[in-house]
Image (cartoon, grey):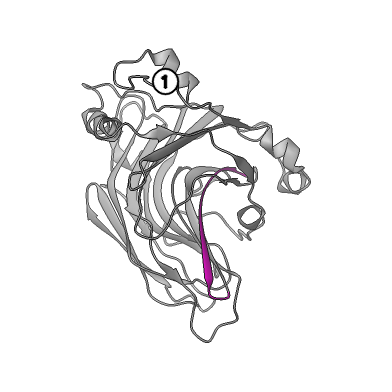
Amino acid sequence: MAKEKMAKMSDEEILKHITTYDAPPVGLNMTSGEDRLLRKHGIPRRPDEKKEPHLKALWDTAMASKPEFIKAEVKVDHLLSERKRPVIAKAPKGDTFKPGGWGGVVVPVKNLGFNPSEPVVTVYGEWFVPTVTPIPNEPAGGQTVGFWVGIDGYGNSQVLQAGMAATVTGNTVNYWVWTEWYPIGAIQVTNFPIKPGDYLTVLVCANQPNHGFCSILNKTTNQATSIGITPPANTTSIGATAEWIVEGISSILPVFSTVVFSNCSAGTKNHKMNTNGGVITEITGTGGANLTAASILSGTSGMVKWLKSS
């Protein structure tokens, strides 16, 4: 769908692409409950213990705490939906974002030599909600940054993503969680509070190319929520890349404490992936200087540091 047409979509039209899930009944055993009940209530599927041992271990750990799944209350996130995207990330050499962009780790599935090649269908990551503060001596307001995991967007015109964002207004910083299948507008979850220091886990899936799913767990509060999302018209998931990203939303990148994406995991239908084979991308300013310093710490972790604002 053309971007011009997407811009004219009403909030009601955008929300038609979104599915929320009723909270599960009290007493539902998530580790032994029927698969159909898990799907009905937006509880992430149980990974296959033999094919996906790492994901299964993470799933078991998450469900052992018996998280409270709540039905997401959602609205169109106009702040994120209307952000300028001069280009979605380009393949090496480097990205060309000015002054927005991505800082983090991108793993192109074609670089991994899978035979046969398969699309990415699952991406997972964990991180502490960073502390975000305004740039000293800069105009108040309009300083926004996002933190997410996703599928696609690196060299193509769509991306399925979910995570959190923070925006500075005067001396106030607002934190929230969101999801998006760009170019459809972003969706904010209004009843899922987060704060600096909370530990989030985020799962994004496109097991069917015409349906996306994300689930977010705040391990600190032990609350979780899930959202289903269908893509724009004439669009299906490509599954070309997996990403763990800090995104500059505004023209000024606010200060954020260092973010470490941990337990990074991704996969195709038959192959597991992580940050090995990843490409580093940085947020760049108007003069071309890096505003972030990203690195791959291990096969399952990546780090993004804030360097400067512009």
Q: Is residue 159 left or right of residue 275?
A: right
- Above or below residue 141? Residue 33 is above
Residue toward you, 79 or 220: 220
Instruction: Tell me residue 16's x, y (percent).
Output: 69, 32
Instruction: Tell me residue 142's x, y (percent).
Output: 61, 70
Instruction: Tell me residue 94's x, y (percent).
Output: 43, 62
Residue 215 appears in the picture as rendered: no
Quarter of the rendering containing residue 1: top right
Quarter of the rendering containing residue 18: top right
Neighbour class for label 1 at 10 Å: few (<14), some, many (≥20)?
Answer: some
> Which residue occupies the extreme bottom position in the image?
137
- Above or below residue 257? Residue 35 is above
Q: Which residue is mark 1?
A: 38
Q: Is residue 178 magenta?
A: yes
Residue 105 appears in the picture as rendered: yes
Q: Which residues are magenta?
A: 170-182
- Above or below residue 153? Residue 36 is above
Q: Is residue 21 magenta?
A: no
Q: Is residue 121 left or right of residue 275?
A: right
Residue toward you, 251 or 241: 251
> Which residue occupies the extreme front position in the image?
26
Rendered residue at 41%/22% (across/down): 26
Instruction: Tell me residue 69's x, y (percent).
Output: 43, 32
Residue toward you, 194 or 130: 194
> Tag 1: residue type?
Leu
